[in-house]
Amino acid sequence: MACKLIPVANTRDFEAPAGVPIRLVTKDPANMLIETADYAGQEVIPAGHPVNSMEFTVAAGSNQVDIVFVFKPGTNAGELHEDCGADSHLIRRVSHDNPFKSFFIVGKG
Amino acid sequence: MRRVIFLAAILIAAPCYAQQFADCPGYREQIDRIAHGTQADAEDAVNELTDVGSTTLCFAQFVAGDAPSMDSVFVNFVKRFEGSRSDKEASAAAGATSATSVVSQGPAAKVLSAAVEYGAITRSVDGQVITLRGNAAGLPSALVRKSIFPYCAEGNASSEFCVGSSILSVLRRISFSVSFDTARGTQTTGTPAAPSSGTGAQPVTFTAQRDQISAASARVELWNRRDVTSKDFQDLWVEKVGPAMAASSTELRQTGAALVAAVRAADLADTYNAWRLKSNGSILAARPDRTRVVDTLRAALEELVIEVRAKHPELAVRAAAAVQSYSRYFLAEDDLIASLSKKNVLALEYSGSQPVGQVGTSNVRLIMDLPLTTRTKMVLNGAATFYDSLPANSPASVTHYRDAQFGLELDHGLGEQSIVGPAMISFALYYQYQHTPPLLEIDPLNPIPGIEFAGLPANARTIFTEKGDIWLGQAKLSLTPPGSSIKVPLSLTYSNRTELVDKPTWRGQVGLAYDLDSLLGALK
């Protein structure tokens, strides 16, 4: 599966064709989970049932992704990747000190 | 009382350390990489440093920390304190041992709970007892949840005055209780175990006191082994973390998103991107001098805040809301870990009681909680009771040392086997060695109809009941209706005798306990 998210130059945001599905995963799912997340103002992962991945379809325009993670005791950091097989790449490093991450995805086309 | 609570809160929320925005872990780590790392490291670090979506907590603290001086923190606190009237909950949080429990549990009460129980197992006394239990961490935790004080997670002080995680972990080990005997003011009955010689039956009433506080206790957990690495703990964490963190995580997501959205609004997109490019260059140029890096970052952040405030004057409000959300998130996380990791608890409890018609006593109890499996645990108690005072005419055989007690209880959570929601079944054995006869204080001039002490002299003021070993067995089922904060214990108890009656006794009891955390949460 080819990666869809491409870093936008001089920013920490990403762009992708509008309408394509994106799957984000935590790299160490036993120790860091997504507790809740939203994209483009819509709740993607409702709180209460933490998961190790989230999927959504890229909307047109610049839209915000907001994620809150939970960490197993003793875990101080983790990573969020785009799940695209061998080419999976880092989206964000996440630290227990700041369990909230927010970035933008620009939907093209 | 309000003044005492106010002062206690101030002490608990003592300054962690002076606020330094560069000490925020998210900033500190990147600043260190910029100052001391390779060029590639520094470039990576500065990219993250100036990304408000990645360092949201630090940025929120920087914006929110712009304003409040120490004075305004206190003014704000007083306003919120008066408005919330949280002292009402806190004053009720002092607590006592239950009159009907055979064996005391090790872990301290979570925040505040109330229990209504009827009767006292080792005494032939009827009466309704209401027990309020509180945890010393309850008040500061409530202050954090109500955003009166921020929470300092370990290594992350968000304010000069914040409730520290280390002090909360100590306070969680301390609990109190107060028992109110609602039957006082009415009459309570008893019968001497060994009537003296004589034929006349004389009505007797125990002295009823207006003050309804029948007992008070304080408990400290001496040892609470935290075992966060065991498989049991990890499995339990996976099971509980979702619901436990749901509310605080949702709030954090919303407030964090709102803050980032203000900075990255469409009308600021060019400004923000230009600011990042310029600031990244300036910060990199300041390396490897860490002080210069910090100064440059501060100047850059101040510039950004001015730009954003011009378009979004409510920026500080959004930042403050985010900081409060982080506080509640970290507090919920620590509360969850504390609630899951209580194993092998060793606690020491002191309780003073003033049963109706009996001499006041002090009890010292050692409590050991030993989890056997995830659902089953064993609780051991050893205690000694002492009379606070002895009647002037006491015989030499009557000493302050009243009795010794030993208790053993097995608790088993029924889990899915229960068809009525969460339930626990318990079996307990209790032994009481009566060193000195129980003393009853009587008032013959104020008799209760229907109570008779055979052969009691007319001038008797004190009755020495019979010594003897007390054995007791109890089976108890504690029901918790799904989704409620209520617990209903149902118990059946057999004893070979009681302190006052030298005959075998069966007792059935129903109690009601209410977890007041939900009420405190509703005040948020």
Image: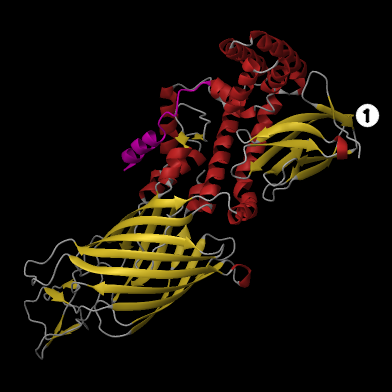
Q: Which amino acid, mark 1?
A: Gly
Q: In which quarter of the image is residue A56?
A: top right
Packing grade of label 1 (10 A; few <14, some 14-19, many >=20) is few
Boundaries of the magenta span: B1-20
Coordinates of residue B291 in the picture (x, y in percent): 56, 12
Coordinates of residue B277 in the picture (x, y in percent): 74, 13
Please check the rendered image and state whether residue B7 is part of the magenta-colored stretch, yes or no. yes
Whether residue B111 appears in this view of the structure is no
Q: Write the residue at 45% across / 43% down.
A: B169
Considering every residue shown, the one lying at the far right of the view is: A109
| Residue in front for this viewpoint, B44 or A53 | B44
| Residue B2 against residue B298 in the figure, above or below | below
| Residue B17 against residue B380 in the figure, above or below | above
Whether residue B510 appears in this view of the structure is yes
What residue sits right under mark 1 in the picture? A109
| Residue in front for this viewpoint, B350 or B324 | B350
Q: In this view, does B358 lie to the left or right of B429?
A: left
| Residue in front for this viewpoint, B361 or B354 | B361
Considering every residue shown, the one lying at the far bottom of the view is: B199
Coordinates of residue A23 in the picture (x, y in percent): 83, 41
Q: Write the residue at 59% across / 60% down.
A: B483
| Label 1: which secondary element | loop
- The quarter of the picture where the N terminus of chain B appears is top left
Q: Write the residue at 88% across / 35% down.
A: A3
Q: Is residue B421 left or right of residue B507?
A: right
Q: Write the residue at 66% across / 12% down.
A: B283
| Residue B287 against residue B69 in the figure, above or below | above
Q: In which quarter of the image is residue A84?
A: top right
